[in-house]
Image (cartoon, rainbow, N blue to C red):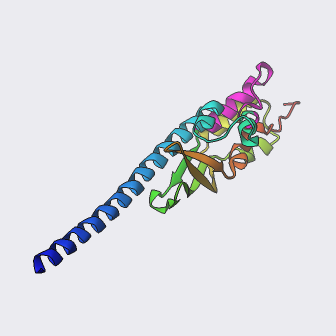
Amino acid sequence: MNYRRAAAAAISLLMIICISGCDIFGIKLAEAEVSELLRLYNIALNDLDADDVRRLTDWTEEDSDYTAIEKMFYAQRSAENEGLYSCTRYIASTITIDYDISTLDINGDRASIEVEYELADWQPLYLDDTYGNCDEILSSLKSSDDTIRIDSKITFEKVDGAWKMCQIYKLGEVMKFAYTTPVIDMIA
């Protein structure tokens, strides 16, 4: 009789360990998937690649975020704005996303994480009316070590067994440089 109780207790303990282990494995897998999503998202931002950003999301063409991202990333892409677009590309290349993966909050098929974007501080240069052209602004951007930081949050949703971004907070604030025109002194 004692053997049966001991065996039942051992089996119960083993089941608890297995269930806990599976949960830990699931969390570690989610953390790895989210980390990879954030790495790919950062690369897409650096490359101003709206299509890659959208591929990392669960957005469809009917979603306003899906169409807004195109406008946000390519506002200045044209032959007559090549100097300005060079500034835009440079600023985008400086974006980094920082986060602490241990703060990933998983709730079933939804998750969220606090992130911090860091990028070249373009704002004072775009407002400085002493520049005669975008090449001068680009040169100043490249020689400056000043950065801005924007605290944000990204939420994720599990779609067909894979994590996808479903909400990117403050992306418009991060990408403001892509649809802002600097003040140029036309007399200079």
Foreground residue, 141 or 101?
101
Question: Looking at the image, which is closer to me, 9 or 186?
Answer: 9
Q: Is residue 169 above or below residue 92?
A: below
Q: Main secondary structure of the magenta part?
A: helix
Q: Is residue 132 left or right of residue 34?
A: right
Instruction: Verify whether residue 116 appears in magenta.
Output: no
* Quadrant for the N terminus in the image: bottom left
For the point 49% across and 44% down, the residue is 161
Percent across and percent down for residue 6 are: 15, 76
56 horizontally vs 5: left or right: right
Residue furthest to the bottom in view is 2
Q: Is residue 96 left or right of residue 131?
A: left
* Rendered location of residue 87, percent (x, y): 69, 33
Measured as percent of width and height from the top left, residue 109 is found at 54, 54
Is residue 85 magenta-colored? yes
Count every numbered label the image shows and give the total: 0
Residue at screen point 71% across, 38% down: 66
Magenta residues, start to end: 71-93
